[in-house]
Image: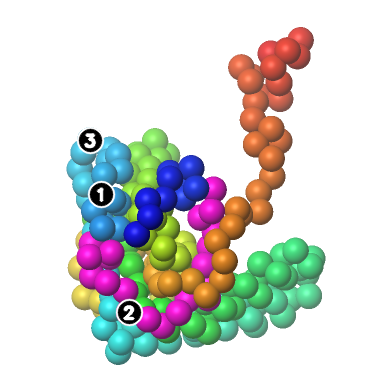
Amino acid sequence: MSELSLHEAIHSLRSMRRLEPDPIREDDLRYMVEAAIQAPSASNRQDWAFVVVTDPERRREVGEVYRQIGYAVVRDGALASGKLDEAARRVYRNAMILVEHMGDAPALVLVAMRGAPPADAARASAYYGSIYPAIQNLMLAARARGLGTTLTTLHKAREGEIKRLLGIPDEYETIALIPVGHPSGRWGRPLRMPATAVTHWNRFGSQPGSASA
């Protein structure tokens, strides 16, 4: 297997919603979690947990809950509202791919954190800042092994049901549900605004060489 550069992994990490049903090797899934736990963790608490779901029946059950949520929120909600422009409709139509096929992904990774999100803004920032870098590491590691992923949170609408299906203790908060598989689409750079449009130098609204910089 050829080595993928970090640059290429970062710049081709598109959301892959169309996944082949071929099984994922256990060592690839373990590699992804190993990469995830190299991320920073506030006070080095490492309160994360990763539930890797490969059992077909369990995936089907999780996928059915996700489908029911997606029908209510995406199909019968956002898409049926008549309030979306074409760009937004495209986003939600793509989301429906996962709504219909989440349970068909050969592996699902449910990422969780011990404890509820703190109400205090500073502590809440540390809480989420201790898990989203791990999620990004996991997805980059998947990309390095030629595997596609998508970060989703729609399951939170029926989190209690998902936790019961996967035996997740009450003291854990689920954060993201990530399907994993060999993509049927092509890798490519995500559609993003240019970095110059969101970069400010020395103070907000200033660019290099400007009088206010």
Amino acid type, residue under disc 1 in the picture? Ile
The disc, 2 or 3, on the residue closer to the chain's N-terminal end is 2
- With respect to residue 69, does 30 lie above or below? above
Q: Which residue is drawn at 41% across and 72% down?
A: 181
Alpha carbon separation for disc pair 2 and 3: 37 Å
Q: Quadrant of residue 90?
A: bottom right
Answer yes or no: do the residues labelled 2 and 3 have beta carbons within 8 Å? Answer: no
Q: Give the range drawn in magenta.
A: 11-30
Cβ–Cβ under 8 Å for marks 1 and 2? no
Image coords of residue 88 (percent x, y): 72, 65
Residue placed at 39% from the left, 36% from the top?
Answer: 122
Residue that appears at 79% across and 66% down: 85
Q: Quick one: SS at disc 2?
A: loop
Q: Is mark 3 on a helix, strand or loop?
A: helix
Q: Residue 37 carries which label?
A: 1
The numbered mark at residue 23 is 2
Reply yes or no: does residue 18 show up in magenta. Answer: yes
Q: Is residue 4 magenta?
A: no
Asked whether 118 or 142 is in front, the reply is: 142
